[in-house]
C-alpha cells in the first residue's frame, strides 16, 4: 500500500503543474477584447496577455473569440498582464513560410495595406514586404507623366486593400527585407498570350496611361504602346484629346518585342491624306494656314489631313529667319513645288517669290 501524500507533497505537485511564462515563448489564447490601442488575450491558467495594436498583424481582421498565437515580450507588467506580440509570433512563423515560397517559386496572394510613390506595402504570413512600382503588371502600373508624382500615388492608393497575386522576388530575414513581384507572377501566362499574337492582328485593350509621347494599353495583361504618331493620321499635339484612362480602344499590332506590343490606332482606318492630296497639283497656287514655324521653315495646313512645308531655302537662303516671314495661324497663298506621295510630303514656295512675301 502506497504511503499517503502529505500536504507538502500536494503543494509541491501543484507548484510543478503551474507553468511559468518565459520571454520569447510562443503562447496560444483567445481574444477577450479589441480596443483602440490594445488587444487582450485570455491565456487560460497563464493569465491574460496584452498586445499593443502596433503588434497586431496587419494582414488579419481579428474579432473577439478568435484563437490566436503570440510571443511573450515581457512576463509581467505593472497591471499584472503579460506583454505579448502577435506580430513577432507571426513573423517568426512567416519567415519560414517566405523561405519555402521563395524556393518553390509558388504564387501567393497579398493585400496591400498602404502605398507610397515607390510602390505598395503588404504583409505575407505576418512579414512586412514591399511591392515596387517597377514590379507591377501592365494592368496596375501607374502610367502617368513623369512630373505627376501625386497622380502616381493616387493610382497606387486604388490598389490598397485589394488582393494581388505575386511571387516572392527577394527575401532576407537578417536584413528584414521582403520584395514581391506581380510581373513574375503573370510571366508564364504572358508568354502563352504572346505566342498567340502576330503583327497585323487587331486587338482591344484598356487605356492605362496617357503621356506626352503616347498611350499605354493593357491587352489581357500585356502592355502595349500607341506612339503619338500612331494615334491619328492628323497631327496629334496632345494624346489626351483622343483617349482617356479606362477607355477601351481598338488597335493594330505593328511590332512585338519581349515585353511590349507596339500598336497603331490610325492604321485601322484609311489614310485620308491619299484622297485629299489628289486635289493638289504641282505648279498650282493654294491657300493654307501656317501651323508651325521652325528654324528650317514653316509647316502649312492645306486641308484637314494634308500638311506641307515651305523650306527656308525658298525664303532666300539659310540666313533667312522664318519667324520674320510668317505669323502663326495666318493664311497665305503658296505655290506647290513638288508632291511626293510615297513619303507623304509636299513642298511649297511663297507665291510670287521672296520679294512679295517680305
Image: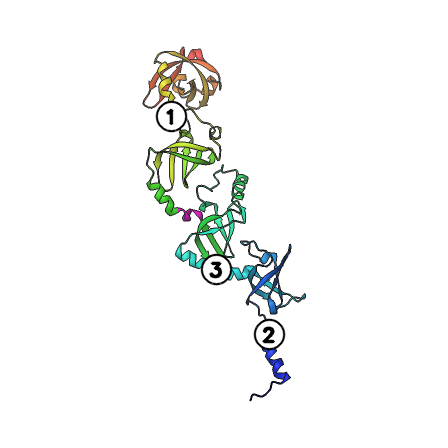
In the figure, residue 73 lies in which quadrant? bottom right
The colour scheme applied to this rendered structure is: rainbow
For discs 2 and 3, the disc positioned in front in the rendered view? 2
Task: Classify 251 as above or below 71.
Answer: above
Q: First in sequence: mark 1 or mark 2? A: 2
Q: Distance between the residues labelled 3 and 1?
A: 55 Å
Instruction: Tell me which numbered mark, 2 or 3, is placed earlier along the sequence.
Output: 2
Front residue of 218 and 115: 218
User: Mark 3 falls on what kind of element?
Assistant: helix
Give the class, few, some or many, for how many residues have Cα within 10 Å of label 1's Cα (few <14, many ≥20).
few
Q: Residues within 10 Å of mark 3 (few under 14, many from 20)?
A: many
The quarter of the picture where residue 154 lies is top right
Q: Earlier in the sequence, mark 3 or mark 1?
A: 3
- The residue segment tinted magenta is 181-186
Q: Percent from the top left, x then y, of residue 164? A: 47, 48
Q: Which residue is drawn at 48% across and 60% down?
A: 95
Q: Mark 2 points at which residue?
A: 18
Q: Where residue 295 appears, x then y in whole percent?
A: 43, 24
Q: In the image, which disc is placed on residue 269?
A: 1
SS for callout 2 = loop
**Which disc, if any, is residue 95?**
3
Between tags 1 and 2, which lies in front?
2
Amino acid at each position: 500500500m502506497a504511503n499517503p501524500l502529505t500536504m507538502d507533497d500536494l503543494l509541491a505537485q501543484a507548484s510543478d503543474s503551474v507553468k511559468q511564462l518565459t520571454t520569447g515563448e510562443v503562447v496560444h489564447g483567445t481574444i477577450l477584447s479589441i480596443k483602440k490601442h490594445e488587444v487582450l488575450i485570455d491565456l487560460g491558467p497563464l493569465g491574460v496577455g496584452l498586445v499593443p495594436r502596433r503588434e497586431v498583424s496587419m494582414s488579419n481582421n481579428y474579432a473577439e473569440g478568435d484563437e490566436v498565437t503570440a510571443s511573450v515580450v515581457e512576463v509581467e507588467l505593472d497591471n499584472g498582464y503579460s506583454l505579448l506580440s502577435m506580430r513577432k509570433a507571426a513573423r517568426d512563423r512567416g519567415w519560414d513560410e517566405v523561405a519555402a515560397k521563395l524556393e518553390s517559386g509558388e504564387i501567393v496572394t497579398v493585400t496591400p495595406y498602404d502605398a507610397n510613390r515607390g510602390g505598395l506595402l503588404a504583409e505575407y504570413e505576418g512579414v512586412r514586404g514591399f511591392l515596387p512600382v517597377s514590379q507591377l503588371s501592365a494592368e496596375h502600373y501607374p502610367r502617368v507623366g513623369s512630373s505627376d508624382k501625386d497622380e502616381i500615388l493616387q493610382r497606387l492608393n486604388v490598389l490598397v486593400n485589394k488582393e494581388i497575386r505575386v511571387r516572392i522576388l527577394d527575401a532576407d530575414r537578417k536584413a528584414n527585407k521582403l520584395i514581391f513581384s506581380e510581373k513574375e507572377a503573370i510571366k508564364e501566362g504572358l508568354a502563352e498570350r504572346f505566342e498567340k499574337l502576330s503583327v497585323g492582328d487587331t486587338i482591344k485593350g484598356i487605356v492605362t496611361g496617357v503621356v506626352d509621347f503616347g498611350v499605354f494599353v493593357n491587352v489581357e495583361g500585356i502592355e502595349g504602346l500607341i506612339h503619338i504618331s500612331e494615334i491619328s493620321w492628323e497631327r496629334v499635339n496632345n494624346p489626351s484629346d483622343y483617349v482617356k484612362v479606362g477607355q477601351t480602344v481598338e488597335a493594330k499590332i505593328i511590332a512585338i518585342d519581349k515585353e511590349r506590343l507596339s500598336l497603331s490606332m490610325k492604321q485601322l482606318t484609311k489614310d485620308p491624306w491619299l484622297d485629299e492630296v489628289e486635289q493638289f497639283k504641282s505648279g498650282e497656287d493654294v491657300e493654307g494656314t501656317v501651323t508651325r514655324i521652325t528654324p528650317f521653315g514653316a509647316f502649312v495646313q492645306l486641308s484637314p489631313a494634308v500638311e506641307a512645308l515651305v523650306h527656308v531655302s525658298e525664303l532666300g537662303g539659310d540666313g533667312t529667319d522664318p519667324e520674320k516671314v510668317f505669323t502663326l495661324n495666318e493664311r497665305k497663298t503658296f505655290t506647290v513645288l513638288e508632291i511626293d506621295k510615297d513619303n507623304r510630303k509636299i513642298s511649297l514656295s511663297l507665291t510670287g517669290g521672296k520679294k512679295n512675301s517680305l
